[in-house]
Structures are given as structure tokens and as C-alpha cells.
Image (spheres, helix red, strand yellow):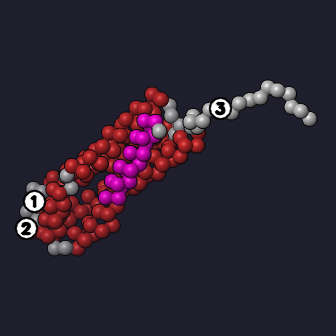
Amino acid sequence: MNTTRILLFAGLVGSALIAGVCFCFGTAIMGSLQRMPAGQGAAAMNLINLRIQNPLFLLVFLGTALVSVALVILAFVKDPPGKSWIIVGSALYLVGVIVVSVAVNLPLNDHLATIDPATAAGATEWQNYLTKWNPANNIRTLTGTLAVIAFALALHTGATTTPDTSRPPAEVSTAPHAS
């Protein structure tokens, strides 16, 4: 297995894990927090935001970004099979997951940590947070999932166009055929 295929597999698994986390937030966690009293929901989200910043999550989240950057570079340097899918998958992860997280979700998380969720102003801020955070998370879920598909298509393209070099070529006989 070559470096590009190993990185593609890592990109596929990493984007799948992150898309899964975003999917869980969008389909279960945020809806549950939204149904709690504002102070409790915001306090729980603040705790989640602290706990998610752990080495394993950050390794997958940021490691997949680094893998995506490496894949784009390799795509242009080596021109591998599935090059277009490699670039698409990497762009989807980098822009749709990383940029959206850094531009929208993380600043909202940081701001939420500064408010007192037990006050009326805090309850208003919590509602404002939800109306901005949830759509951005939906974008992360969708683009992360599409990155998984693109990386899978790149792997499939490479698997169907890469010659098998583990076997020697068949010998070609130059003897005339007897009829």
C-alpha cells in the first residue's frame, strides 16, 4: 500500500469519525440541551465544550486536517488515480469542517463560556447561540459526510486503476501455434 492510499484511508476514517460526532450533536445532543431550562442547557454545553478538548478528539479533528493538506499536496505532486476525489474530499473537510468550526462554532462556544446562563440575558444569549451554532453544525455534518464519500471514491478509483505489481507479468510465447 502506498503513502497516498494510507493517507486516503486515514482521511476517510478521520472524516467519518468527525462527521459522526457532528451528526450526534445535530440529532440528539443539541435538541436535548435545547429542551432543558436555558441555564442548564448552556451550562451543560459549556461542560461539553471543555471535555471535548481532549487529546484523542483533537488528534482526530486536527490530524484529519493535516492528512487532508498532505493529500492535496500529494495529489498535485504525484497525480494519483482519483486525484479529483482526493482534492474534493480534502476541500470538503478543510472548508466545511475546519473553517466552519474555526469561523462559527468555536467563537460561539468561547462566547457562551463568558455569559451567566442563569440570567435573563444569558437565556437570550443561549437562544442566539442555538440559532447560529446548529446550522453551522449541520454544514459540518454534511461536508464531513461528503468528504467520507469522496475519499472512498478516491480509494475505489485507485483500487480499480492500480496494476497488480506483486505478480510478475505473464510470459508471452513467441513459438508458432500448432494447429
Residue 119, which numbered label?
A: 2
Picture quadrant where residue 46 is located: bottom left
Q: Is residue 86 visible?
A: yes
Task: Residue at 65%, 32% (x, y): give it.
Answer: 169
Name the amino acid, label 1: Ile
How many C-alpha atoms fall within 10 Å of the one at disc 1: few (<14), some, or many (≥20)? some
Residue 52, which numbered label?
A: none
Q: Secondary structure at mark 2?
A: loop
Predominant secondary structure, magenta span: helix
Task: Residue at 22%, 69% (x, y): give it.
Answer: 33
**Which residue is label 1 attached to?**
115
Nearer to us: label 3 or label 1: 3
Q: CA distance from mark 3 to mark 2?
A: 76 Å
**Which residue is label 3 attached to?**
169
**Residue nearest the observer in this picture, 40 or 115:** 40
Q: Residue 112 location, x and y as percent?
A: 15, 58
Which of pointers 3 and 2 lies earlier in the amino acid sequence? 2
